[in-house]
Amino acid sequence: MIALTALKYMILSSTVTTLIFGVIFLFLSHQENALFMRIWGLCWIIYFIMFTMDVAHLGAYHISHSYILLKQIFSLSTAFLFLYGTYLFFHLKMSYIIKALTLLFFGSVLISFWFYNVYELLLIPNVLFSTVLVAWAGCIFYIYTWTQNIPEKYLLCFLIILWSICSNNFTFLLPRLELSTFNYFASLLILHVTIIFLLIVYFKKIYYLLTKQETRFRMLVENATEHIFLYDYIKQCFAYISPSAEDIFGYSVSELKKDSAKFLQHLNPADKQKMDCLLKEPVTQSSMETFQVIKEYAQPVWCEIHYTPILDDDGTTVSLEWILRDISAKKKIEEELKETENMKRELLEDIAHEIRTPVTLIKGYAESILNDVISPSAVHSYLKSIYSKAELLNTLVNDFMQASYFTSQTMEFRFYEVNAKQFMEDMISQCEYHIAQSGITPVCESYIPEDIIIVVDKSRIEQVFSNLVANALRYAGELATVLISVTASERALEQKNSYITMDGVSSGEIVVKIVDSGMGIAQEDLPHIFQRKYRGKNASARSGSGLGLFISKQIITQHSGRIWAKNEPNSGAAFYFTLPYYLEGEEEEDFMDI
């Protein structure tokens, strides 16, 4: 009797291990929010209750009908719960047939409480069904996988099937003490080993999923356009840096991790101080910063970082996570937009400034006529002045529009082949009339052969003549002369920069010279007179938009020509421009739209 009591306590102490395993599984289910772990934990707790009840009947020669039925309910419950947890572990859906059969056998056991004959009839099918449920769970571990085959999984499959056989046959052995004792110890041992291997497989699966998730996250981070940084405030170094950041800072990830000062090396002093404070003094809230990385022999890189502090349980910042973006393209667009806005503002300012004087004069002349302030004989003179100022306004507006077209690269050209001699004589004739009408003496010379052609947009070249002549008239002075000289030269081929145009190599160049007899151009103004809106140091005393020479240079450049200015000895300023020409017969007649 004493030996039996000691044996019961020994077996009972072993069954407590099953309860401990159940508590462990419930704890893990709470930590991982895993339903299958909660179901398995409940399964082990029911097994503990069932084993405890069996220990109480250990060695008994009379087993009650109620005990056997209750034992069958516990056995069927644990078998179903373990199988259901296994389905959830592999993310599978349990068949409705299994659920229906389990309910049917549960009903048969409950009916057996009142009908003993049913118990005798269904006892063996119930035991076999419980065994099949547990054995099927073992087969699931063999059949299904998570792309990782480990030896523990196959051994677990064998243990579950062995456990299903041992855990449901001890009812028939209880009257034989020596056999029931062996059966209990064998069942407990197999169950505990099965649970241990189940934990091993579970933790290996968790480790595999975490490793796979980490690999995917690393691939995502390393292939993203943004660059991820993690700075450890405790160790005062970077814990993680995206490999793609090496191209920005010029150092490898290992070098940046080893020496965080290299991160600041290519920053300007202001940005370096700002980022140094960010790395040395822990921050408490998310924010963003911008800085510029300037490396020798490389384009500067604008960077934008969005950082977030990582806090411990005490609320202390232990590390800093940030996302770095290359915003160089964005900055370039912003600068271009800013430049465009400045150009629009400057254009409006230019228009307002330039048209103010002509409009004021037109208004004054018109008011004088309307108010009969002037004599009738002077009306014609005033109307002539009004017309002249209106023409000036028209010229100013055209200059502004054309300067805008050149700036935006939307100016349209229509090139045609024309006879050089005829075209130049037409231009000289028009300029001669214009100069004479201004009360200035024109001097015109033309030395162009009959057999050469030029490819030009006639209206644009006419505009160049008009701009240069207007400029000469503006600065020629009273009782002066304006010289226009047009010659054809073959020396272009002998120069270092021979003409290579859109149509090939030209035969030579036509040189147009326009000289006034004024005071000339200040030496410091010569390098800048073809710049947009540049009018020289005495420009404030002159009229004009400051765009005529700029427009002329753009037009001549589009014609593959050159334009320059210099001061002529014993004369005023001289403006030159050239156009490439071809001998007739070298090119077929055609035209081009640009």
Image: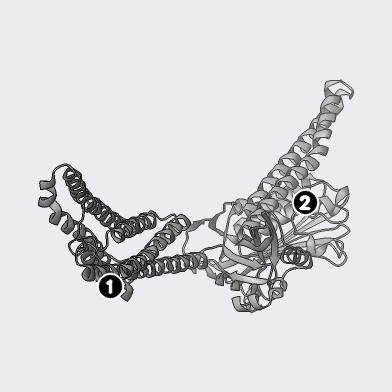
Q: Is residue 269 left or right of residue 141?
A: right
Residue 307 can be seen in this image? no
Identify residue for label 2.
546
Q: Nearer the viewer, residue 162 or 55?
A: 55
Quarter of the rendering containing residue 285: bottom right
Q: Residue at x 86, y 20 (%)?
A: 371
Q: Earlier in the sequence, mark 1 or mark 2?
A: 1
Q: CA distance from mark 1 to mark 2?
A: 90 Å
Whether label 1 touches label 2, CB < 8 Å = no
Work out whether 525 lies above or below 466: below
Residue type beneath disc 2: Gly
Q: Position of residue 382 (x, y in %)?
A: 83, 31
Q: Residue at x 10, y 47 (%)?
A: 117
Quarter of the rendering containing residue 355: top right
Crowd band around label 1 with a 10 angstrom C-alpha radius: few (<14), some (14–19), many (20+):
some
Q: Nearer the viewer, residue 167 or 398?
A: 167
- Position of the N terminus, as image quadrant, is bottom left
